[in-house]
Amino acid sequence: MVNESGIGYGTIAHDGSGIGSDANAVAPLPLAGGAGGGSMETPTPSRKREGNTRQLVLDALSGVMDPEIPTLSVLDLGMITNVEVEDGTAHVRFLPTFVACPATSYIKSNIAKALMEAGFTSIQVDLETEMSWTSDRISEHGRKLLEEFGLGAPVQIDGTLNFEQIEHVACPYCGSENTELRSMFGSTLCRSIHYCMDCKQSFERFKPL
Amino acid sequence: MSEAIKDLLYRMAEDELILGHRNSEWTGLGPILEEDIAFSSIAQDQIGHALANYTILNEQFGEPVPDVIAFSRDEKQFHCCQFVELPIGDYAFSLIRHFLFDHAETIRYEALALSSFAPLGSLAKKIKGELKYHVLHGDLWVTKLGQGTEESHARMQTALNEAFPYALGMFEPSKYDEELEREKVTIGETALQTKWLEVVTPILEKANLVLPKLSIKDRKYGGRQGYHTEYLQPLIDEMTEVYRLDPAATW
């Protein structure tokens, strides 16, 4: 069973066909953003089937969506810090966004479910505690998807967040920079409310953090 | 050393849990929609921060799981300061309390980001970014209403006069202060209070608000030792009402 109770990790192990135990892969994911990522392990030399099995994990993760922004995957949001396949076990390190995000345990169990559906019989999802999530980890692709979804994208903060960065955002509908901050708190913890003076639309934005 | 860190974690978790509960009382009742959402979001953050601190207590020190800690004790076992227990009052009082509390939290977590106790250090690095939104929100409204109309200014000054003696209770010295400082876990309560006053005073001045003159005996201490106001136990009774129906239920 997946342990969903807060910080800790869950292991799923059950019978079924899947990845052979000779499949070994240890390699870090590229960091989505620039600053604030923290250090990563260096890649170890490739072994047989590494590319395949690791790619299977990544493919599965690209289908695990944020429940509040269902077009963005956990990869787009920079919530995955490491992927390894070792002795047939898929290891994923998962970094929640906001401390009080109510979707954390839900996303974690969705990751385990997706890996199970991809054929992994032994799965371990660990919460990343060594580093902090920052909106700088959202990939370029993720930023585009946010705007397509109708949310303003966060600016790069490079470790220091100030009022200018919170206030300033381009309208996701018309691209105008002539926008105004209406509230630092929106319909979810990760959103703020803005108004576009040009196309006269209210919109929400994924907060820089 | 572990007793000192446990005491610190309980104090922080309980301040956030109780004030988070109080702030959530604005949900559906805020004076304008944006402020309703703001107080609800701040409450959600605070309860999340309480959970994170209780989780460290559980995982590092073998204390009960967070729900059991939060929902199965009575007021004498709570370590929160009296400031967070007070009823929400009018909006001016809730706003002033939010302003004074979140600046204190920010200073506390900034110091903890450098902590020698790694689990708290890494949590603090994360939380201090989130608190930035809280303090910017508080600063904005305190300044706006302090500089606003005669009535808004008067209400804010009255709220500050009521809140301030209790706010000082956030920094009630602990018998563990020296040990925590020596072991580089965090800085002591007196040093925190000094830094806090340096931060809030200029903002209050800009808002045309004056800190009341207090004598030492006016400070509302006691919460950290389990001495609470008449308001805490009814809050706990309400907060735990559903849990107590069936403590073993799975959600």
Image (tube, rainbow, N blue to C red):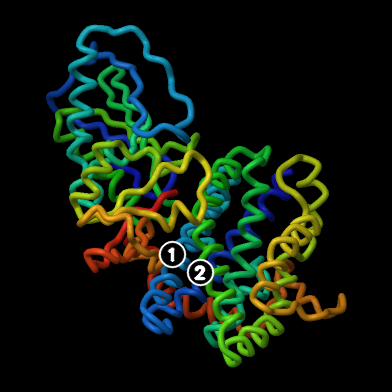
Please state the horizontal and vertical placement of residue B162, each as a whole percent of the image.
69, 84
Please state the horizontal and vertical placement of residue B89, each as a whole percent of the image.
56, 86
Chain of residue at mark 2: B
**Which image quarter: residue B107?**
bottom right
Mark 2 is on which residue type? Gly
Please state the horizontal and vertical placement of residue A8, each as a whole percent of the image.
43, 41
Labels 1 and 2 within one chain = yes
Sequence-first disc among 1 and 2:
2
Can residue A68 be seen? no
* Left/right of residue A136 with respect to residue B118 in the rendered view: left
Would you place residue A5 above or below residue A87 in this image?
below
Circle 2 is placed at which residue position? Answer: B20
Can residue B132 be seen? yes
Disc marking residue B44: 1
Please state the horizontal and vertical placement of residue A152, each as a whole percent of the image.
29, 53
**Which image quarter: residue B120?**
top right
**Disc 1 + disc 2, Cβ < 8 Å:** yes
Would you place residue A181 above or below residue A53 in this image?
below
For the residue pair B110 and B187, the one nearer the viewer reads as: B110
